[in-house]
Image (cartoon, rainbow, N blue to C red):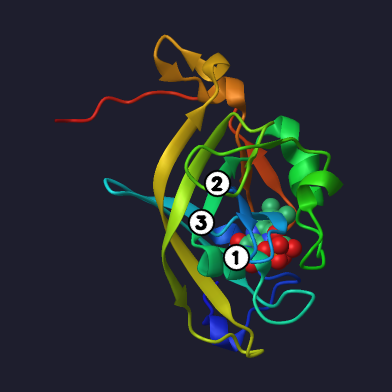
Amino acid sequence: MFYKPENGHNLPRNPLQACVVPRPIGWISTIGKSGALNLAPFSHFNFVSISPPIVMYSCSGYHVDGDEKDSALNAKETGEFVYNMATWSTREAMNLSSKSFKRNEDEFSFSGLTKVSSEVVKPPRVGESPISLECKTWKCIELPEAPDKSKTILVLGKVVGVHIKDDVIKDGFVDTVKIKPLARLGYKDYAIVDKAFSIDRPD
Ligand SMILES: Cc1cc2nc3c(=O)[nH]c(=O)nc-3n(C[C@H](O)[C@H](O)[C@H](O)COP(=O)(O)O)c2cc1C
């Protein structure tokens, strides 16, 4: 099949999210101007450059209180966020933290997660995540308007601190299979990394 996104498709559910998979999940913690903590998952997330180390996530649609989602607003207003890795063992808490909360409600407490102080930035990290990246917002870019006129904000941040739990480092390498990172597929589907293989580069 072929279709242009603006013309729609003839499938029962939008297939587009299933066309770029698996997507890593950026589990993003931020703090608002008022000091309210926030945590939410984003699968429109990635590591876009190693040097300088830059990550990005995008927030689409509106917050329950109107205007931008907390994760975009906070990263813009206070200039910091933390990426936490979502894993098989944190899948339920990660999903709970995606609920539409009011601006001053704290998803850490609702999801039963441990707040651990960061080293460089103010937002805490998720204690249950084996890997967290402390980030300073570099740029927020408003993407073209959606057909329903809702906004999408792309947040780019520079990594200023890296946390890796010692127990996931084996012989000097991060043991990804032990971590079992969670990834997003299309629809309501997820994948986990529980098998890895290596290939040598040709040069
Ligand atoms: C696995 C997963 C991935 C998600 N990815 C995105 C995403 O990429 N962009 C987005 O706007 N919302 C995404 N969401 C929904 C947000 O997490 C949800 O709207 C959340 O309430 C936003 O919270 P905030 O207003 O505190 O930032 C995702 C939800 C789940 C469960």
| Within-10-Å neighbours for mark 3: few <14, some 14–19, many 20+ | many
Badge 2: few (under 14), some or many (20 or more) residues near its Cα, within 10 Å?
Answer: many
Look at mark 2 in the image and give the residue it sits on: 83
**Quadrant holding ligand 1?**
bottom right
Q: Distance of mark 1 from mark 2, alpha carbons?
A: 14 Å
Q: Position of residue 44 (x, y in %)?
A: 55, 60
Q: Which residue is drawn at 26% across and 45% down?
A: 51
Q: Please report whichever mark, 1 or 3, sits nearer to the chain's N-terminal start.
A: 1
Closer to us: mark 1 or mark 2?
Answer: 1
Alpha-carbon neighbours of circle 1 within 10 Å: few (<14), some, or many (≥20)?
many
Quarter the C terminus occupies = top left
**Nearest the eye: 142 or 34:** 34
Left/right of residue 139 with respect to residue 35 in the rendered view: left
Q: Do the residues labelled 1 and 2 touch (CB within 8 Å)?
A: no
Labelled disc at residue 80: 3
Quadrant where the N terminus sits is: bottom right
> Does 107 sit above or below residue 13?
above
Q: Name the residue type under label 1.
A: Asn
Q: Name the residue under label 1.
A: 74
Give the secondary structure at mark 2: strand
Q: Nearer the viewer, mark 2 or mark 3?
A: 3
Q: Where is residue 55 in the image (x, y as percent from the top left)?
A: 43, 52
Q: Examine the image and state in which quarter residue 124 appears.
A: top right
Q: Which residue lies furthest to the front in this view?
A: 34
Indicate if the residue with disc 1 has its beta carbon within 8 Å of ligand 1.
yes
Whether 166 is drawn above or below 7: the answer is above
Number of marks in picture: 3
- Residue 106 image position (x, y, % from top left): 79, 54
The percent position of residue 174, horizontal first and vertical second, equals: 46, 22
Residue drawn at x 58%, y 32% as measured from the top left: 193
